[in-house]
Every structure is written in structure tokens, then in C-alpha cells.
Amino acid sequence: MSADIFSSVRLGDIELANRVVMAPMTRDRAGPLDEPTELMVEYYRQRASAGLIITEGTQPSPAGKGYWRTPGIHSPEQVEGWRKVADAVHEQGGRIAMQLMHVGRASVRANKAADAETVAPSAIASPDPIPGPDGVPVPTEMPRALEASDIPQVIAQYVAAARNAIAAGLDGVELHCASGYLPMQFLSSNSNQRGDAYGGSAENRVRFVVETLSALAAAIGPGRVGFRICPGVTFNGMADADPAETYATLLRAVDGMGLAWCHLIHIPNAGFDALDLVRANWSGAVIENCGLTLDKAQGLIADGRADAVSFGYAFIGNPDLVERFRNGIPLAKADRATFYTGYGDDAKGYTDYPRAG
């Protein structure tokens, strides 16, 4: 009998009641100290019937922040806030992993602490504007190129963040290696112009991600560590000369680590089939994401091409998405105008979507 999205599955050390994953989505609702608020606790509690929730991108350090009111995991207040989130999800029988997101050069000065530096593999600014505190997009600032001696410190920040996440009661972490943020800036040939062991060839450009994943696995166990990729995406100024080569190299390099999952954002215009690329170079579990319908998701699971499937926007408007899928209930439409307008204390478009029936 073939599996379906409602069957249980084990991703590394994490047992999922079903294969429907809530994808990480920035919502700009953190408090003034970048701590999870009570509103965020309720938001995640409402969606705990997902087999796994992967949280919104969470900065591992002050330098890792690029957007207004995104949460962190590097202060006591932030750890305590995430503990409330994890407890709420677990009380509902759910599982939750934290996405660790260091934005690197994709940063606006007004969004971060005055003493928080903006860093990147090379001193090349991101060409895509980013919303400031008032929501109006403004140009990013020029980053400082990381010295080779800085890189172990950045990896150590990721490790400390992962340990904090586990201490707060979350079930695992996911390294965000997509969307033009710091790990992808190392991966992409146009944003990484380094002349040392972290730049140049594909083998060198994947080194930062490989070392970070290895350090995370050593710190909290490989079965609690996943990673997210999006080969071929151009968001935040990415333009890798050969993404198929880059990501095949990365996947082969981390395949033997025993990591919990590879979370693929599968864009259709990369010039190659990214899921085929992943399956050819990675033997671990795969979470497939991007533009899925229930029928497409069921087909991927039944064919064994994916072990789980993740949904983003559908979870915004449908806190009971799994139940709606299971019972054939039409999906509610999410209000895009309120995706990023909460600023910590506005439930509209966040926790006010009703459950069906």
C-alpha cells in the first residue's frame, strides 16, 4: 500500500503524525526585543495539526537580522518566547522545528540594532530593495566581506542558536540556504567573489554550508537538523553561473551526515528539474515545496518522490489545513495585504482566520 499525505513519517529523529509540513513564512509579528509574542504563540498553536511546523526565519545573531520585527533566538527573552510557542504546539500533539535565517547582505540598517554589522562573503550589495520599519522598500547597505577568521564565529552563532532552540523545547532546526541569504550568498558564484578556500570552485563555495551543517549536527544531533535550498532562484540578487553543479556538489557533500531532511523550494524556471537533481545526489528524506495542490502533493508522496510536502500561503488562511484536506473542505483565501502588517500586536490576517465548520 502506497503512502499518502495523512500517513505518519519519520524525518531523522522527529516522528510526524502526517506528511503535511507548514513551511516557514516571515510574518513580522515579533515583539520589540525580537521575542515571540503571545500572538505568535496562538498563531502556531492554531496550526499544530501539521505533521511538522517549520517556524518563520529566526535570526541566530543580531547581525543576522534584516527585516523588521522578525524573531531571534540569541537572547533570554527570545528563548523564553519560543519555549511558550513550543509548549503550545506540543500540547496540541504537534512537532515544531526552527528555521535559522542569517540574511547576510539582504539587510536594511534601520531594521537592525545600531551596533549589528552587515556581513557577506564579499563586499557586494544586494540589488533588491528591502522594506524598512514603515514597510517601504529601501536600498540595502554595503556589507563587509567576512574574513576567513570571522567564519568560525558565524558558524558558532548558528550553533548557539540551535542549542537555544533545543533548550526552548523545539524538536529541531532547519538551516535556511535559500532566498538569497547568507548561506546562499556563499553558494552563488555572483555573490561569492572570494579568493580563499570559501570561494571560486563549487567545492569551495559549498564549504560554508557544509561546515555549518556539520557543526549543527555535532551540537544537537544530525537527526534534528534539516536544510532548505532553492536551486536557480534569483531573489535578492542571486545569479549562480551553474546552479545544477553547485547544488549537486552541496548535496553530495552533506549526504553522508545523517541529516533529517532536505527541504526543496522547487521553482519551475531553473532550466533543470530540481527534484530530480536532489534525488540523484541526496539519499535522505525530501520535503517538496512550491505551488502544490492536494492532488500534486498526494502524487509526489504516492510515487515516492517526496517524503513530505510543505505548504505556505495555504496555512495562513487555513489554520486547520490538514483537516480541510482530509475532509475535502474548500480552502479559505489568505489576505495578502495583511501578510506583513502586524508589527507585533495586530491579529488581523494572522490569528483571526476561522476553522471550517
Image (cartoon, grey):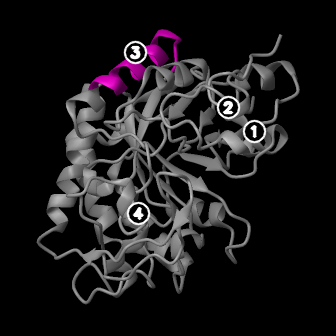
Instruction: Judge the density around disc 2: few (<14), some (14-19), many (≥20) Cα neighbours within 10 Å.
Output: some
**Residue type beneath disc 1:** Asp
Q: Is residue 230 above or below residue 14?
A: below
Q: Nearer the N terminus, badge 3 or badge 1?
A: 3
Which of the image's four quarters has the N terminus?
A: top right
Q: Are marks 1 and 2 in contact (CB under 8 Å)?
A: yes
Q: Earlier in the sequence, mark 4 or mark 3?
A: 3
Which residue carries the number 1 mark? 335
Q: Quadrant of the C terminus?
A: top right
**Where does the magenta region start and end?**
80-94
Q: Is residue 242 visible?
A: yes
Q: Position of residue 43 (x, y in %)?
A: 56, 24
Whole-number angstrom distance, CA of label 4 to CA of label 3: 33 Å
Mark 3: amino acid:
Asp
Please indicate, yes or no, whether residue 3 appears anywhere in the rendered image: no
Label 3 CA crowd tier, 10 Å (few <14, some 14–19, many 20+): some
Query: In front here: 89 or 237?
Result: 237
From the viewer's perspective, is residue 317 above or below residue 49?
below
Mark 1 and mark 2: span between their CA atoms? Answer: 6 Å
**Looking at numbered disc 4 in the image, what kind of residue is underneath it?**
Val
The residues bearing labels 3 and 2 have C-alpha atoms spaced at a distance of 23 Å
Residue 101 image label: none
Amino acid type for the residue under numbered disc 2:
Gly
- Residue placed under numbered mark 2 in the picture: 349
In the rendered structure, the answer to whether residue 184 lies left or right of residue 271 reads left
Question: Which residue ends up furthest to the left in the rendered image?
Answer: 149
Does dot 4 land on a helix, a strand or a loop?
loop
Provide the secondary structure element on which disc 3 rests: helix
Whole-angstrom CA distance, mark 3 to mark 1, is 28 Å
Residue 186 screen position, x and y as percent: 36, 73
